[in-house]
Amino acid sequence: MKNRPFKQVDVFTSQPYFGNPLAVVLDGSGLDDEAMQRFARWTNLSETTFLLPPADPAADYRVRIFTPGGELPFAGHPTLGSCHAWLQAGGQPKRKDFIVQECRVGLINIRREGTRQAFAAPALKRSAPSPVVLAQVAAALGLKAQQILAAQLLDNGPVWLGLLLDGAETVLQIEPDHLALKKHGVKVGVAGAYRAPDASVLIARKNREARAFAASAPAAVAESVAADFEIRAFAAPMGIEEDPVTGSLNASLAQWLIAEGHAPERYLASQGVCLGRAGQVHIERDATGQVWVGGQSVTCIEGSVTL
């Protein structure tokens, strides 16, 4: 065991403690799978990452991403948070236009957008879900059939059942049966559009959890006024009832919704309101058709960890 540089960062926020936390071990060399998994269980965060020298000469660094329950081939907020930590620790990209991250799905390009970074969404596979599974999930979420406008199975490494609902109010009012979702073994991401510029504040006041949040963080809630969509992610099969802000889900939702004409080529998504967070996810599809998923990161804890 040795002391290794360590950071805990908050992703998809400019305000510490309002995004999605990530533990980053900046030197994962010499650690085996068991040691990485043990530490990820100990941090008890949705993800913990370990940075390593790249195996591919085109990459700037390699990352391994662990949840408390296992390793992920790709995840969005660990990608942005790891990149932020790597740059802050003095990492120097080989290219001027992109930072290149290596992970189990391959190479991920990350670009700088002012004070935030954005990753290129990996290739998406999608298909129609089973009507039986869709009905089971709708029941577990307390949704009526007419509230679900569209549904797709989305796979960009992690697999999500994506649901487009009839509005942000419906998204915020969901009270899931997490045990049922775990039993069905389905991770579910829901999205709903805001109908008016001030709708987010009005809806937040109607929601029990968001109302308490608004009282303690009015500035953070005010930021969500500009959001075009509200997103929630339920991942009980992974041991996470609700994820605060989810990059991989936002990436696959964006690829699907934009392609099918349900969303514009550039939009802002809000996520985490019901958990007392104020996640902000910036989506853009460029002229080549590549979807970029961006957000700010901020370091909350830094020092060393003995591993």
Image (spheres, grey):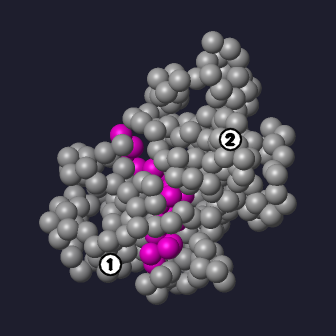
Would you say residue 241 sits in the magenta stretch? Answer: yes
User: Residue 207's spot in the image, x, y percent?
Assistant: 41, 62
Q: Which is more toward the observer, 170 or 253?
A: 253
Q: Which sits earlier in the primary sequence, circle 2 or circle 1?
A: 2
How many labels sit on residues?
A: 2
| Residue corresponding to mark 1 | 150
Name the residue rendered at 24%, 80% in the picture: 146
- Of the 4 image quadrants, the one containing the N terminus is top right
Name the residue rendered at 40%, 77% in the picture: 167
Examine the rendering and report whether any part of residue 105 can be seen. Answer: yes
Segment tinted magenta in the rendering: 239-257
Q: Which is more toward the observer, 176 or 21?
A: 21
Q: Which is more toward the observer, 101 or 302?
A: 101
For this view, does 194 lie left or right of residue 287?
A: left
For label 2, the crowd category at 10 Å Cα-Cα, with few meaning under 14, some 14 to 19 and many 20 or more, is some
Among the 4 quarters of the image, the one containing residue 129: bottom left
Name the residue rendered at 32%, 78% in the picture: 150
For this view, does 2 lie left or right of residue 31?
A: right
User: Residue 96's spot in the image, x, y percent?
Assistant: 84, 60
Among the 4 quarters of the image, the one containing residue 233: bottom left
Would you say residue 248 sits in the magenta stretch? Answer: yes
User: Residue 244's spot in the image, x, y percent?
Assistant: 50, 51
| Residue corresponding to mark 2 | 54
